[in-house]
Amino acid sequence: MKLLIVVSTDQGGPLLAPLASACLRNNIQCGCFFTNDGVKLLGDPTLATLVGQADQQVACEHSWFRFMGQQACPVELAAKPITAPWSALRTTS
């Protein structure tokens, strides 16, 4: 993975959408991690679909249930960031 996008605020949508689109358009491997109230952005179906095209997408489980309740999460939930799938990945140039 070349780029990990960390979304920690629900104000990040205007930056996330074009950044994720640019990565997809240019075949740049990217992943997204949502935490704090940034998980609220996954409630937007258009944005969730866009992010769903990234190589990896994970949301903080605690943040999800705090801000989104019992709604189904459209991405993988992780109890701790260290358990996120990319923790074992190494970047290559």
Image (tube, rainbow, N blue to C red):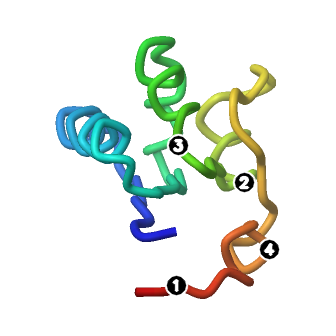
Classify residue 59 as left or right of residue 49: right
Vertical relation: 17 (above or below) 4: above
Q: Which residue is drawn at 44% across and 30% down?
A: 41
In the figure, 84 relative to 8: above or below?
Answer: below
Q: Do the residues labelled 3 and 2 touch (CB within 8 Å)?
A: no
Asked if disc 1 and disc 3 are in contact, CB closer than 8 Å, the reply is no
Q: Around disc 3, counting alpha carbons within 10 Å, would you say few (fewer than 14), some (14 to 19), or many (20 or more)? A: some
Mark 3 residue element: loop
Residue 85 horizontal/vertical position (percent): 75, 67
Residue 18 coordinates in the image, percent (x, y): 21, 35
Which comes sooner in the sequence, label 1 or label 4?
4
Q: Mark 2 points at which residue?
A: 62
| Mark 1 or mark 3, earlier in chain | 3
| Quadrant showing the C terminus | bottom left
Pointer 3 and pointer 4: residues touching (CB < 8 Å)? no
**Label 1 sits on residue:** 91
The residue singled out by tag 3 in the image is 54
